Structures are given as structure tokens and as C-alpha cells.
Image: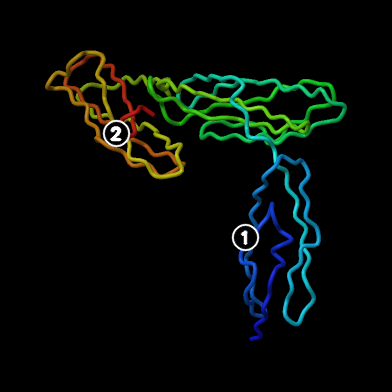
Amino acid sequence: MIIFSFNWDVAKFKPDFSIVPSKGYIASGMDLPLEIAFHPSVVNADIRYSNLTCNIEGGKPLKLTLTGVCAACPPTGKELVQFQCSVRETDRKMVSISNKTGSQWILTPVIEAEFFQGPDTLVIEAGATKLYNISYKPFRMTSADKKHLGSVFFALPDGSELLYNMQGAADPPKPVDTIIREVPFKQPHTELIPVSNWEKTPQKFKVIIDLMKPDKLDPSTQLNELDYLDVPGLTKRDYKLNFYSHKEGNFQAKVVYSLPPHFPL
């Protein structure tokens, strides 16, 4: 194994860039990661450092070119875009962006949010106005005092910026299905109800049975269920609901599967 020393001419990186490690040793056949930091102090749309040199013992110097763009500090949000839908449903809104220059723009929006999404790029022809589509699809409910928050930022080629703040309200879910069964009395019946986990991680669902009709079951009628159901991430699992009645009648119940702190899913 042969070991070589190396060192960067760090003076030529200043004041906008720095590199770590700037000097040291490396063995033949070895990879050494270098961390380059960009820390501009003035607004500049074209910061360029060419022919930055790394001297290597017994070998040819390596050359490096660095470029960067320093924009003004992000502006305060232009306006608040509000979304509202049931959990696992989708609400869509659009924001408009005008290109008043004589050249085409290709924008790369930056979305900072968990349940908000939008296209990776937006092309706006010269002198045109385009709409950017934002989708809100929440997997968790919100409360009156805690909404889903986010923002979408556009760095424009003319040196200006746009920032939209976003707020989403996720209402209780709509019924996934209505199940109607007619079964003989004095005969057990098991209903398999599919339960989906939309999260990537396993979830333990709390099972809540809300008896709607009648208000109270006769002692001869049984509606048995497990209190919890474990479902692996991004999969579906059947929940077994057992029903038995000694006499005829109409029964109606609502089955809710919730996650801590018991938000219905």
C-alpha cells in the first residue's frame, strides 16, 4: 500500500467556498470524501471559481471548478393558500406565475411540507403566465388548533422570488364502504372487513364499535370484536367481526379504526 499526501490551495476558495479536509493523506485505491461548503456573503447570480488546485505528492495536481448562485433572502409569503378535504382524499389548488421577460423560464419549485405535492418543474414561455398545481392529500386528521402547514418557493431567473404559504385541514374520513348482510338467526356469521395501512411503518389500530340501532344489544345478541388490529406498512389486513343473534331483528353499527391519539383512519 502506497500513501500519498495531498493539500488544497484553500486561499483560492475564499470567501465563498471552503473544503474539508483541506489536507491529509490517502492510500492507493482508497476513496476519500470531501465536503465543500458554499457560504456567499453577497447576492450574485453567477459565482464561479475555476482551476482550484489540489497538489498530490508524486502526481499531477487535480483541478476543480465550483459555481453557485446567491439569491436574496426568501421573501415573506405572498399569500396563504388554504386546502381542506377528508383524510386520504385530495384537494387541489393552483397558483399563477407570470414571466414578463423575453426568454423562457424553467422553474424548479421547492415544496417544504409533508402532505403537499406538485410537479418538479414548471416551464413558462416568454411573456406568458402559467398555473402551478399543488395537491394536498393528508394521511392524518387535523384538529381545530393544529393544521398541516407548508410552503412552496420559486426562485425566478430575473432575480426575484415567490413564496406561498400553505395550510391544510384534514376532516374525518368518509365511510369506506357500507356493508349490508342478511343472515339467519341462531347461526354465527363472521364478516371480513379489509383494513389498509397507508403509512410505511406498521400501525396498531384501535377498533371502536359504535352501535347505532338498536342503542343497546339484547343479552342474546353478540357482536364480538378484537380491541386492536396490527397492520404492516403499506399493506391490507382483514378484520374479523363476529355476529350472533338468538332472534330476528335489524342491527346497525359503525366500525372505526383509529391511530393514537385515536384519530379515525
Q: Secondary structure at mark 2?
A: strand
Q: Position of residue 221 (x, y in %)?
A: 17, 22
Q: Which residue is rendered at x = 39% and y = 44% of the image?
A: 202
- Between residues 175 and 77, which one lies in front from this camera angle? 77
Quadrant for the N terminus in the image: bottom right
Q: Is residue 35 left or right of residue 251?
A: right
Left or right of 205 in this view: 57 = right
**Residue identifier under label 1:** 35
Q: Position of residue 108 (x, y in %)?
A: 70, 36
Say above or below: 126 vs 109.
Answer: above
Q: State which quarter of the image contains the C terminus.
A: top left
Percent x, y of residue 179: 37, 21
Question: Front-most of 248 and 34?
Answer: 34
Vertical arrangement, residue 233 with respect to residue 211, above or below: below
Q: Residues within 10 Å of mark 1 (few under 14, many from 20)?
A: few
Answer with left or right where residue 184 lies relative to residue 20: left
Q: Which amino acid lies under the numbered mark 2 shown in the image of this protein?
A: Lys
Disc tally is: 2
Kindly give the residue lying farthest to the bottom in the view shown.
Answer: 1
Mark 2–mark 1 distance (CA, rounded to whole Å): 47 Å
Q: Quadrant of residue 247?
A: top left
Up/down of 240 relative to 164, above or below: below
Quadrant in the rendering for residue 246:
top left
Residue identifier under label 2: 206
| Three-letter residue code for mark 1 | Glu
Q: Secondary structure at mark 1?
A: strand
**Disc with the residue nearer the chain's start (2 vs 1):** 1
Q: Residue at x 36, y 31 (%)?
A: 193
Closer to us: 207 or 219: 207
- CB atoms at circles 2 and 1 under 8 Å apart? no
The quadrant in which residue 171 appears is top left
Which scheme is used to colour this image of the protein?
rainbow
